[in-house]
Amino acid sequence: MKDITAAVLVIGDEILSGRTKDKNIGYIAECFSNIGVYCKEVRIVPDQEEKIIGALNELRNEYTYVMTTGGIGPTHDDITADCVAKAFGVGISENNDAINMLLERIPLEDLNESRRRMARIPHGATLIENNVSKAPGFQIENVFVMAGVPAVMQAMLDVVITRIDKGQKLFTCNISTNIKEGDIADILRDIQKNNPSVMIGSYPYYTDEGYGANIVCRAKKLDELKNIASMIESSLSVIGNVEVGDFE
Amino acid sequence: MKDITAAVLVIGDEILSGRTKDKNIGYIAECFSNIGVYCKEVRIVPDQEEKIIGALNELRNEYTYVMTTGGIGPTHDDITADCVAKAFGVGISENNDAINMLLERIPLEDLNESRRRMARIPHGATLIENNVSKAPGFQIENVFVMAGVPAVMQAMLDVVITRIDKGQKLFTCNISTNIKEGDIADILRDIQKNNPSVMIGSYPYYTDEGYGANIVCRAKKLDELKNIASMIESSLSVIGNVEVGDFE
C-alpha cells in the first residue's frame, strides 16, 4: 500500500511575529497520525501572495494532501482564497451555497461587502462547512483550505477527515527511561540498524527530578514492534529504570 | 536600513507525528520581533537527509539568518550536523573545543562513541555554547544550528542574539474590541489602504463570553502608530467597546 502523505501550510503574519502561538500544527499532525496519514512537512508563511502561492504549488505537487490554515476571514489581510485560485489558475467568485451558509448565522442586513468576501470560492472547489463560525473552508483537488482560529479549524478538520484516504496507522510504543541519552545511543543504533522496518526515535528530557530519555518505537506490524520493545527493555534495564508503555 | 530577516527550520519526526508539540517556533519568533529581526518563514521537516539539505539551502539563500532546531543529540536519528556540512559542501570532524565543553559535564570515562558524535562540527563553523547540556550548537555562515529541547535551545539563542545584527523593532499596539470582524473589515480596509506604512492585522476570537476581534497595528514610526490607533479607536467606538493597549 502506498503511503498517504500530507503537508500543512500555515498562513499568517501573526504566527511569524510570535504574537499568536500556533495550535493547529500539532493538532493536525496528531490527528493524521491516528488515521495513518503521514505529515511530512510544515511551512509557515506570511500574508504575502507570492509566498503563499509558491509554497502551495510546491507542496501540492509533492504530497497526497495539503492542509492550509489561516487567512480566510473578512478583513483586508485575508488573501488565502485569492492566492489558492491563482495557484490553480482558476477564477474566483461569490458562491451561492457559501452565501447560504453565512446566512445561517448572519442576518441578511448584516451581510456587508466584507462578509460577502468570505463566500468568494475558487471555481471548481467543494465547500467545507463548520458549525462554529458557519463561514466555509473549501477543497480544490488535493488542497484543503481551513480557518486559522483553532475551534473553527478543528470543526473543519472533522469534515476533511471524512473525505480523505486513510493509510495504515503505525503502531506506537513509548519506552520511558531515566537513562541519559548518551548511555543508550550505541545500543539503540545497533538495534535500529538490524531492524530497519521499525522506526526508533530517542527524545531526551530535562526535569527538576533529573534527566533521561524517552524512546518511541513505531512500526506497521504489531508483532515486530513488540519484539523490538522487548529487545530494548532487556538491553536497557541493566543500565537503569525502563518502563514499556502500551502498544497503541 | 535594510530589513534583517530570518527563517526557522525545525528538524524532527516527533514534531511531524504530533507526539511532541513544538515550543521553539513561537519563542524564537517573539524573541526576534523584539530585536527587529523579521521571521519570514518556518519549515518543519523530518529527520531525512534530502529534506533537511533541500530546505536549508533554500532558506539560507533567501534570508539574512536561518535558525535550525533539533537533531544534534547523540542518537542515530540525530543527523543535522552531517546534513549541514553536506549543504555547505564542507567536511565534518570531531572538534577539540566541543570535546572540552562536553567534558565540563561528562566524566572522561563516560565519553563514549555516541557522545563524541555531539562534538562533530562542520569545518569552518563557530561553536554556540550552552549552560544546560554543555553540548554545543554551531554557526556556519548565516546558519545557526541549535538543540531541539526547549531549555537548551533557549540557552543557545541567548548566545546567538549577541552575534546577529539587530534591525529596527516595530512599535506595536493591540486594540481589543468586542465587535465582530465582519463589522469592522470595511473600515479597517480603508484605513489600511490610506496608510500603507502601518501594518494592520485583525484577529477574530471566540470565547464563552462572546466573540469579537483584536486589531494589531505595527509601524516603524511611533507617531504614525499613535495616529492610526487613534483613528481606529474613533471609527470603532461608535460600534462597540474599544480598548487601545500600550504602545510597545
Image (cartoon, coloured by chain):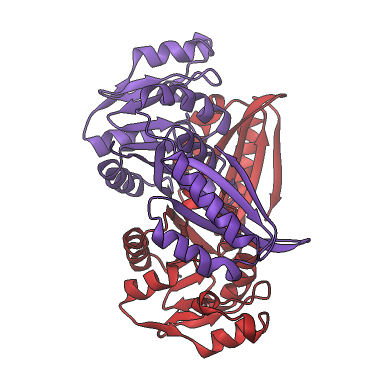
Chain colours: A purple, B red
* Image: A12 above or below B40: above
**In-front residue for pair A212/A67:** A212
Can the viewer see residue B17 in this picture? no
Q: Where is residue A116 shown, x and y percent of the image?
A: 42, 20
* Image: B192 above or below B13: above
Q: Residue at x 58, y 61 (%)?
A: A235
* A194 with respect to B74 (left or right): left
* A166 with respect to B39 (left or right): left
Q: Residue at x 32, y 38 (%)?
A: A83
* Image: A230 above or below A78: below
Can the viewer see residue A219 in this picture? yes
Q: Quadrant of residue B202?
A: top right
Quick one: quadrant of the C terminus of chain A? top right
* Image: B213 above or below B208: below
Q: Quadrant of residue B83?
A: bottom left
Q: Residue furthest bottom?
A: B96
**In-front residue for pair A90/B181:** A90
